[in-house]
Image (cartoon, rainbow, N blue to C red):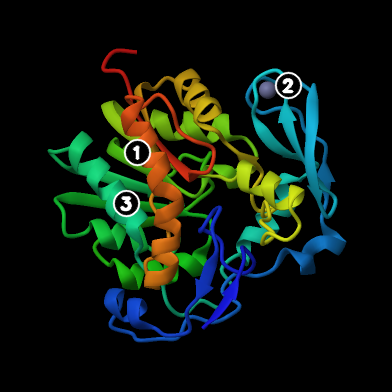
Amino acid sequence: MRLSIFKSVDGLHGCFLFQQENTMMAEKISNNTQRVPKSFFISWEQYYDNLEVEDVACALCGSNNHVSMGREHIFEIRKCLNCGLVYVSPQPTSESLAAFYETYYGDIEAPRSFGDFETHIKHIIRARCPDGGRLLDVGCGLGTFLHYMSDDNWELYGVDLSEKALEVARRVVPEATLTIGAFEDDFHPQVQFDCVTLIAVLEHTKDPRRTLSNIISKLRPGGVLIVQVPYILAFFRLSRRFPFLPRVTFETPRHLFDFSPATLQRLMGECGLEKLVVDVARPYCGQNNWVRMAIWMIKIPGILLRLLSGGRYIYPFAGAIVVHGVKPEKE
Ligand SMILES: [Zn+2]
């Protein structure tokens, strides 16, 4: 086992990561007990030479008025002075991003493990959608979350950009209806969903408003959208101010945004959702008890502060947040 910080595996967001080299959790979700390769995701570095980038304005309000939060490689992390959205500029062009995500998952042999965050999202789904129905996971990747939901009363659907990932997902969750497609496309046409999950996806998209609007158009009136995103700006700034601390990276240009509770709620509200609720996301990695405990120690104050403030305050060291809302019955 070795410690790495935010380097080779996406999806932890704001915390340390122990890459385990055992396959315990993989065995749990698949009868094919296969080793997770160390090079689980392909590095951006090999793409830098051919990367096409473009300067962008704030995706939430359109303003160009910003302050710099720092820089990684050629990528500047900016905070919009008008609305507070934290975004990356320049960003890879759509063509460069598409080329990268074709090979995003590398040579995958086994799915990621479950963590506390899956349990938390399942709890949210059970509370908001007690009757079940059709569940769509956008950016379903290897099918891990769909598999986790398969013991509940849901008709399962998934969409992902990567055919390689979907090949794994078809083995992991054979009962699900899976399709390849961009998240702005008309995937799964003529199906209306009761619940849609978007876990660690929205921060990767170039046009989150367009992505959300398309997904919400596929929700039935009264349906629920659950969005989980990293929220790491506070860690990022702290690690730059105090160089003796472990360096936290923004994960540019995989991650193009760092939504806050305010900016994500505003975006989801403007896309037509109501009854929005914000929560602190639970830890991603459930494999190692020490890491899990350390992450919980950081998150527990945030969860308590949220409860004490009646849901109004999410502290900046949440690491990741979940926002969920309902599509109105009458538009
Ligand atoms: Zn803005």
Q: Position of residue 100 (x, y in %)?
A: 68, 60
Q: Residues within 10 Å of mark 1 (few under 14, many from 20)?
A: some
Q: Can you identify the residue that label 1 sits on? A: 304
Q: Can you identify the residue that label 3 sits on? A: 157
Q: Can you identify the residue that label 2 sits on? A: 81
Q: Quadrant of residue 245?
A: bottom right
Helix, strand or loop under label 2: loop
Disc 2 CB within 8 Å of nearest ligand 1 atom: yes
Q: Position of residue 144 (x, y in %)?
A: 36, 63
* Separation (CA) of disc 2 from disc 3: 39 Å
Pick the residue in front: 22 or 280: 280
Q: Amino acid at mark 3?
A: Tyr
Q: Is residue 322 above or below residue 283?
A: above
Q: Amino acid at mark 1?
A: Leu
Q: Position of residue 40 (x, y in %)?
A: 56, 74
Residue 13 relative to residue 257: left or right: left
| Residue 327 seen from this side | yes
N-terminal-most mark, 1 or 2: 2
